[in-house]
């Protein structure tokens, strides 16, 4: 009997290819796991009107964690046009399945390491090793949005904040509103996890990134909580930066940062910027972690124009599998896997097109698997 049950969610496009690569290295590691396939992604939206069917949610409840490839997402109107004819005009609205997973399973912590491996020709600098903690269920991605703006919502807003009245002349039908909702509990949780990680791994600083000079209430809340949490960790410095300045500082001095923590949208933006500093999305792994469940995914998308060519870099997916092994407590196997990835990168003999070589992703995965054997 296998030790783990892992939900296997390839999703769309190149997600299917990089998951195949991940399986090569997991098998080479002889991980004691059953991989249980689940339905998720654009094809299920088109044919069923649901990119995350209930059967998949039920499946996840029977597993230890999930490994996820990539999905295709499109704007609301375009998504509606691609529904099967019998589902047209049924009032179905597309919602990102990965965002739904984060909310359904309370995957409050999005963890994104950005590490420069020696020998990677795409490194901006060779001494970058930072980790971004992104709050995963609140903030700008909380899903509380309106268009058009309902009269009753407008009336309540005007009652509590007269600044809202200046938008009335546009007409409520012409107003779209996205909210940024943050709770003290959510802020305290993500900050505590960031500081705990820093202490556990011997890192010296945690940098809070937000925009409290403009977003005074939400930004002010997370800033106040950060100061409270920091007092419990006297050996770790709390740094603060506005989001716009942080984009500059990351390009200028990325090696100075250890742990960065941010709300949902700002963390998402910074993660892609930081990923490019260490080679791009082909090296960008991530984990969505809750109290008792986790979903692991590379940060790149489904890249439909590359599907079927086996050219997309699989290292992000393979490092994502490494994060999964760490979370499961298989630290020896996780360390072996990271060393194998680092060896292949350092030797520079096998790589995908983004690394200036012409190997397929299966050949890259095969080289990494060969190191493990």
Image (cartoon, grey):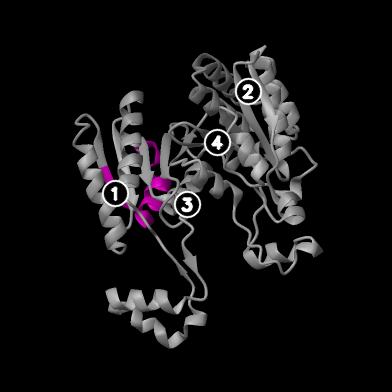
Judging by the rendered image, the residue that carries numbered circle 2 is: 344
Q: Secondary structure at mark 3?
A: helix
* Sequence-wise first label, 4 or 3: 3
Q: Are marks 4 and 3 in contact (CB under 8 Å)?
A: no
Q: Are marks 1 and 2 in contact (CB under 8 Å)?
A: no
Asked if the stretch drawn in magenta spans residue 370, the answer is no
Place of residue 243 in the rendered image (x, y in percent of width and height, measured from the top left): 37, 54
Q: Residues within 10 Å of mark 1 (few under 14, many from 20)?
A: few
**Distance from label 4 to label 1 (Cα)?**
24 Å
- Using the image, tell me which numbered label, if any, was put on residue 295: 4
Q: Is residue 132 left or right of residue 373?
A: left
- Using the image, tell me which numbered label, if any, was put on residue 269: 3
Q: Secondary structure at mark 1?
A: helix
**Distance from label 3 to label 2 (Cα)?**
29 Å
**Distance from label 1 to label 2 (Cα)?**
44 Å
Where the N terminus falls, by quadrant?
Answer: top right
Judging by the rendered image, the residue that carries numbered circle 1 is: 184
Q: Residue at x 50, y 33 (%)?
A: 293
């Amino acid at each position: 009997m296998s030790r783990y049950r892992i939900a296997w969610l390839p999703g769309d496009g190149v997600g299917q290819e990089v998951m195949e690569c991940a399986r090569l290295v997991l098998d080479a590691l002889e991980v004691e796991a059953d991989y249980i396939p689940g339905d998720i992604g654009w094809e299920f939206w088109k044919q069923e009107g649901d990119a995350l069917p209930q059967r998949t949610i039920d499946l996840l409840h029977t597993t230890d964690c999930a490994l996820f490839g990539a999905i295709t997402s499109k704007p609301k109107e375009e998504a509606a046009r691609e529904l099967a004819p019998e589902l047209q005009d049924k009032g179905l609205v597309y919602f990102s399945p990965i965002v739904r997973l984060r909310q359904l399973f309370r995957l409050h912590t999005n963890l994104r390491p950005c590490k420069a491996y020696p020998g990677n020709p795409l490194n901006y600098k060779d001494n970058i090793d930072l980790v971004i903690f992104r709050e995963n269920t609140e903030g700008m991605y909380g899903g509380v949005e309106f268009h058009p703006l309902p009269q009753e919502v407008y009336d309540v807003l005007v009652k509590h904040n007269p600044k809202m009245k200046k938008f009335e002349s546009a007409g409520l039908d012409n107003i779209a509103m996205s909210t940024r909702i943050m709770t003290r509990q959510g802020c305290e949780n993500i900050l505590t996890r960031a500081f705990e990680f820093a202490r556990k791994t011997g890192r010296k600083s945690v940098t809070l990134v937000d925009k409290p000079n403009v977003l005074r209430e939400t930004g002010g809340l997370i800033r106040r909580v950060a100061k409270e949490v920091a007092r419990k960790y006297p050996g770790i410095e709390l740094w603060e930066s506005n989001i716009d300045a942080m984009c500059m500082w990351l390009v200028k001095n990325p090696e100075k940062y250890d742990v960065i923590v941010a709300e949902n949208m700002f963390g998402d933006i910074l993660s892609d910027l930081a990923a490019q500093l260490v080679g791009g999305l082909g090296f960008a792994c991530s984990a969505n972690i809750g109290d008792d469940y986790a979903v692991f995914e590379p940060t790149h998308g489904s890249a439909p124009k590359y599907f079927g060519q086996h050219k997309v870099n699989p290292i992000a997916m393979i490092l994502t599998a490494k994060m999964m092994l760490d979370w499961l407590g298989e630290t020896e196997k996780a360390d072996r896997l990271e060393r194998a990835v680092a060896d292949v990168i350092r030797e520079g003999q096998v790589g995908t097109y983004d690394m200036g070589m012409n190997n397929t992703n299966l050949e890259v995965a095969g080289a990494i698997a060969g190191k493990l054997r």
